[in-house]
Image (cartoon, helix red, strand yellow):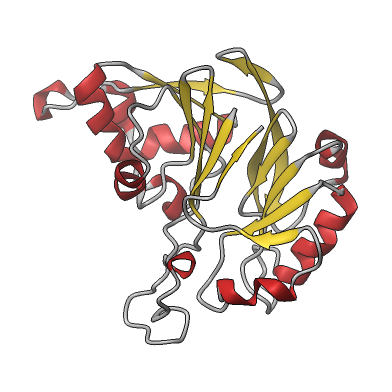
Amino acid sequence: MKITILGSGTSTGIPMVGCGCPVCTSTDPKDSRTRASLLVEHDGHFILVDTSTDLRIQAVREKIPRIDAVLFTHTHADHVHGIDDLRGFHFHHRQIIPCYASPETLAELESKFDYLFNGRSEYGYHQIMEPHGVDGPFDLFGLRITPIPLLHGTMASTGFRFGRFAYLTDCSRIPEASLPLLTGLEILVIDGLRHTPHPHHFNIAEAIRVAAAIAPERTYITHLTHDISHGSEGDLPAGVYYAYDGLSFSL
């Protein structure tokens, strides 16, 4: 199984429009961050987690040949508004792509993007997505996937575990009932927006504290703002790193 961080940035992306701060003008390519998303390759299949606003750029950059399934964490714009870019894969392969999310997330997606789920032939649109609601572990292409219920401020979001890897973006709290689902991890990728507190995201210190409780072998902090320079990674505890676009793992 190969896992690639497609995007490691917050909702604005980095550089942020109109900003001349040191991170937004940095020449370090690891400070250039597209919106948060993930690719899992398993047994010849490509599983996308979230259709970020920058999906087309990410897919071209990583030379993704197709998408066989999509998992959605929640419905905030930076995680779903690249959904229309899936049409490019459909034009090439003519496959309907199954997507998996909580029933609440699916209902909102189907409402916002009904033309992708139902088609509107009179406007030239065809169905390209097939919804599957999940509220517990499920198998996909021979891979066991475990949804991890999270809290993102006052709304629910979903993390996902694939074997000894877990992806927990956009969260400010992990419910006690979810913690047993995160034991024995090799790699954890977790939300850590910035150093200062935020009501809907872990900050860096909170992400580090939660990661210490989960105790993976390695932790990568994602969904980073322009307050975080990749060059400051040396300030993090041992075994904790900043994620960056294109970072990949083989498990």
Q: Quadrant of residue 112?
A: top left
Residue 74 in the image: above or below residue 127:
below
The structure residue drawn at horizontal position 56% and vertical position 66%, both measured from the top left corner, is: 224
The structure residue drawn at horizontal position 66% and vertical position 18%, both measured from the top left corner, is: 138
The residue at the far top in this view is 142
Depth order, front residue of 3/174: 3
Q: Could you tell whether 148 is left or right of 55 in the image?
A: right
Q: Quadrant of residue 185?
A: top right
Q: How many marks?
A: 0
Residue 104 in the image: above or below residue 199:
above
Where residue 123 appears, as percent x and y from the top left, is 11, 30
Where residue 65 appears, as percent x and y from the top left, is 32, 28
Depth order, front residue of 115/6: 6
Where residue 216 appears, as percent x and y from the top left, is 82, 46
Inspect this view and state whether residue 198 appears: yes
The structure residue drawn at horizontal position 39% and vertical position 27%, both measured from the top left corner, is: 67
Depth order, front residue of 7/179: 7
**Quadrant the N terminus occupies:** top right
Inspect this view and state whether residue 126 appears: no
Where residue 151 appears, as percent x and y from the top left, is 70, 51
**Quadrant the C terminus occupies:** top right
Residue 65 in the image: above or below residue 241:
above
Residue 200 in the image: above or below residue 81:
below
